Amino acid sequence: MRHHGTASKTIVLIAALAVCLTVLLLFSHKADAVHKGAGGLVCGLCHTMHNSQGNSGLGGASGGSIILLRAEVNSRAEIHKLCLQCHASNGSMANDTHPPQNVVAPKVYSTASWTQNDPFNKIGAGGNFSTELDSNWNTTTANYLGYGHSLGATNVLPPGGDVSIPEFSCTSCHDPHGASSPSDAKINIFRNLKVNATGAGANAGIKFYSGTTEEYYKHKSYVGGVNGSYFGGSETDGAGQVIWPVYRGTLTGNPVTDSANSNSYGTGTDTSDPTNGTAPATMSRWCAQCHDNWHEEIVPSNLNRSTDLDSRRHAVNSMMPRGASAGCATGCHVSLLDRVNYDDALIQAGKGLPVTASKFYSANSYYLPTDTTGASFNGMDDVSGGDNHKVFCLTCHFAHGGPYRDNLRWDYLASVATGDQTANGIPSNIGCQLCHNR
């Protein structure tokens, strides 16, 4: 019996040593399961096994945080309080560099301010949660639910949605661990967006096209160092915080030469089942997982394609031919476009409308072009191919949040008491009137 007890103790000791060795290996080497696109961050940057080391806390809740997180996270609605440690201007790791690119994490919460007359890269492609969250990252401010996606919200029905989301946070849309393969069935390499957004309804399940073997217009500007498209470390907003901009550098108005300075979105045919491998999904179709009633492919009555006149909501899968002008009704489609205000000067100022990329040239352009001449542009206004430049959700809205209501890129309502809303006069050359000059 004595020998048996000794053997048992030996086995337990070996097992304990094995666990300790495993933990040491996890925290002393790169763990490529974390933020794959952005680099091999170690597990211990976000998780802690016991929330203590040397009897000192490691940044989690005193009684431990959910899923071993190193932040005050007591529910899944508060996961953003971990993410913002790196992705907020006042986060504890806001200015730390991370291998292997040795870049600072881009910010989605910043003290920067801007106006509707500023170029889009001053806020960044995703926008800013600062109007939705207070300085402690709580959704208790007066702006809660109105300026963007409300992190920390519980039991909310997305506008245009059909299913209430119990707890909303960063991981409702993004997978923090990421994907290393374009064929990953659960995670898109593009922005680490989930194939099935958490809490999405019947129209969930959006897999983007990936890989350089496909035509360029189907590609995505991947998060992280994939395909050399990582925008981070040098592009900053008005407060000097690193961001992922809509564009970087100087724009000339020529989408071919502006290619290196643009951060484009992929295009394709927005079908209700884009996971079938033949129909690439656009960003709008991904958003429609939760906002499904506002997408014309899911609710066809939103847009009568026989005439394009019976529009119930602004289309998110429709061509924006560059040649469209006042009275354009021949050679493109029945149109209400009047792009007198949309010109090269607007693009050069960084205010060109983000659209999905076209299949008619191999440039990486984030904006709706204006030039209609030259061999490189032949066919750009031919809508028969179905894959020309298209307006989509991010043409008018920021992805995360912004200074204006409804996450819009322009201020279109005055801040007045309920029941006394009046139109907010804006210059006639911005907002809706970029394309619908009246």
Image (cartoon, grey):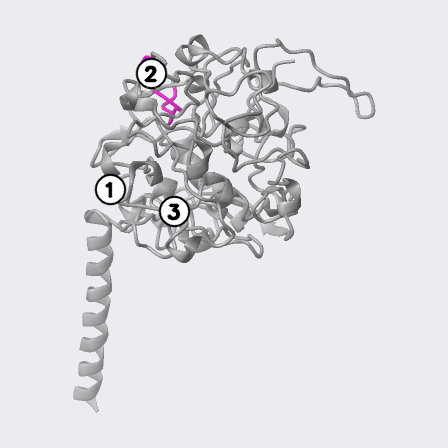
Check if residue 248 falls in the magenta segment.
Answer: yes
What amino acid is found at the position of numbered circle 1 in the picture? Thr
Neighbour class for label 1 at 10 Å: few (<14), some, many (≥20)?
few
Would you identify the image quadrant in which residue 222 lies? Answer: top left
What amino acid is found at the position of numbered circle 2 in the picture? Asn
**Distance between the Cα atoms at labels 3 and 2?**
27 Å
Q: Mark 3–mark 2 contact, CB under 8 Å?
A: no
Q: Mark 3–mark 1 contact, CB under 8 Å?
A: no
Q: Mark 1–mark 2 contact, CB under 8 Å?
A: no
Q: Earlier in the sequence, mark 3 or mark 2?
A: 3
Q: Is residue 358 left or right of residue 42?
A: right
Work out whether residue 306 or residue 186 is closer to the camera in this orientation and state it. 306
Q: Residue at x 35, y 16 (%)?
A: 373
Tell me the residue that label 1 is attached to: 212
**Distance between the Cα atoms at labels 3 and 1?**
13 Å
Secondary element under disc 2, as helix, strand or loop, is: loop
Q: Which residues are magenta?
A: 241-250
Question: Is 244 drawn above or below residue 197 in the view shown?
Answer: above
Question: Whole-percent x and y of residue 57?
Answer: 39, 44
Q: Earlier in the sequence, mark 1 or mark 2?
A: 1
Identify the image quadrant of the N terminus: bottom left
Secondary element under disc 3, as helix, strand or loop, is: loop
Question: Whole-percent x and y of residue 96?
Answer: 30, 29
Would you identify the image quadrant in which residue 238 lies? Answer: top left
**Most common secondary structure along the magenta stretch:** loop
Work out whether residue 293 or residue 381 is closer to the camera in this orientation and state it. 381
Tell me the residue that label 3 is attached to: 208
Q: Is residue 160 left or right of residue 212?
A: right
Tell me the residue that label 2 is attached to: 254
Work out whether residue 162 or residue 77 is closer to the camera in this orientation and state it. 162
Question: Whole-percent x and y of residue 7?
Answer: 18, 82
Q: Residue at x 38, y 33 (%)?
A: 86
